[in-house]
Structure formats: C-alpha cells, structure tokens
Amino acid sequence: MNMDTIYADLSISMSEFKKNPAQVLRVAGEKPVAILNHNRPAFYMVTPKIFEMLVEALADRELTKLVRHRLTQKDRSVEVDIDTV
C-alpha cells in the first residue's frame, strides 16, 4: 500500500479541477487545495497571499541559518557603536 500525506484540508480530482479551476479557487478562499491525480497529490493550488507567506517563511529560515552560522564565528566579529551604525 502506498499512502501520501496531503498538506491541505481541501482536495479535488484533476478531472474535476480542469472543469472549472476558477470555481475551485473561489470555493477554497484562502485555503490551499490538493489537486489529486489517481488519488495522489499532483500539485497544490494556493493563492498569491499564501504563496508569499511561504516564500517569506523560507527566506526567514535561510536568514536564521545564516545568523546561527555567523554566531559561531565570534573570532571574526567587529565591535561597533550602535549609535554610529
């Protein structure tokens, strides 16, 4: 048995989605929708607002990694006065 995790509360078959994608978007509102092909996730439909949130979260994650890495390099740090920055 092959089971896939679906990362959405809403899902629709590919054939139903193709009939009227705009209607699916209207019904979903701001919720992501899993588009299924043979009962397996083929792709997710998200609004621009959700996509922007995902991109920002990924950027924040990368920035956090960079900050943590730089904190391990205290020997390369330079002291500065916050009032002159």
Image (cartoon, rainbow, N blue to C red):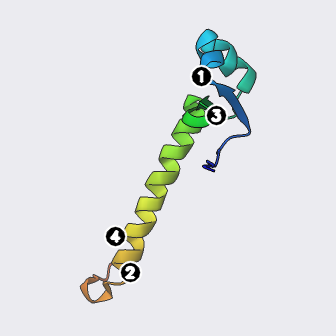
Q: Which mark is residue 32?
A: none
Q: Residue furthest bottom?
A: 75
* Image quadrant in which you'd find residue 13: top right
Q: Can you give x and y, in whole percent of width and height, for residue 57 in the image?
A: 52, 52
Residue indicated by mark 1? 14
Does the residue at mark 4 contact the one at mark 3 (Cβ under 8 Å)?
no
Relative image position of residue 2 (x, y in whole percent): 60, 49
Give the numbered dot on residue 71. Answer: 2
Q: Are marks 1 and 3 in contact (CB under 8 Å)?
A: no
- The Cα atoms of the two marked residues, 4 and 2, are separated by 22 Å
- Label 1 sits on a secondary structure element that is helix
Q: Which-is-in-front pick, marks 1 and 3?
A: 3
Q: Which mark is residue 39?
A: 3
Using the rendered image of the protein, determine whether residue 81 is visible from the camera's viewpoint: no
Disc number lying in front (2 or 3): 3
Q: Nearer the viewer, mark 4 or mark 3?
A: 3
- Residue sitting nearer the eye, 83 or 42: 42
Position of 44 relative to 26 (above/below): below
- Residue that appears at 60% across and 37% down: 40
- The mark that comes first in sequence, 1 or 3, is 1
Q: Secondary structure at mark 3?
A: loop
Q: CA distance from mark 2 to mark 3?
A: 46 Å
In contact (CB < 8 Å): disc 4 and disc 2:
no
How crowded pointer 4 is (Cα within 10 Å; few <14, some 14-19, many 20+) is rated as few
- Which residue is rendered at x = 64% and y = 45% of the image? 7
Spatial CA distance of label 1 from label 2 is 47 Å
Query: Mark 4 or 1 closer to N-term?
Result: 1
Work out how far the residue at label 1 is from the one at label 3, CA to CA, in angstroms: 9 Å
For discs 1 and 2, the disc positioned in front in the rendered view: 1
